[in-house]
Amino acid sequence: MPRSKKRKHHHDYRPPANALKSKKNRSAVTVAIVFVAFIGMGIAYFAAGDAPLWPLWLAAGAIVGAFAGYYFGREIDKAFAKK
C-alpha cells in the first residue's frame, strides 16, 4: 500500500472557506418552537380559567410560546456550534 501521507508537500484535505455548512443538525429551533408553544398553550389554558374567549387565550399563548421557543432554540444552536 502506498503511503501518500509520508510524501513531501502532502496536505490534509480542507474544505474551501466559502463552503456551505450542513444544516441537518439544526433541529433545536424546530423542537424548541413546538415544545415551548405547547407550554405556552398550557399556561394560557390555566390562566384563562372560565373566560369566554379561551380559544383566543390559547392562540395567544401558542404564538408567544413559539416566539420564545424560536429564540431559545437559536441560542441552543449557537451554543452547540461553538463546540
Image: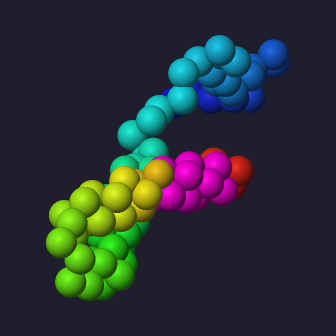
Is any atom of residue 67 visible in this view?
yes
Q: Position of residue 18 (x, y in %)?
A: 65, 15
Magenta stretch, residue numbers: 68-79
Residue at 54%, 21% (x, y): give it: 20
Residue 61 lies in magenta, yes or no?
no
Q: Position of residue 28 (x, y in %)?
A: 44, 55
Residue at 33%, 74% (x, y): give it: 44
Q: Where the C terminus falls, by quadrant? A: bottom right
Q: Nearer the viewer, residue 69 or 9?
A: 69
Residue at 45%, 35% (x, y): give it: 23
Q: Is residue 43 above or below residue 9?
A: below
Q: Is residue 49 above or below residue 67?
A: below
Q: Nearer the viewer, residue 66 or 45?
A: 45
Q: Is residue 32 above or below residue 2?
A: below
Is any atom of residue 32 visible in this view?
no
Residue 70 lies in magenta, yes or no?
yes
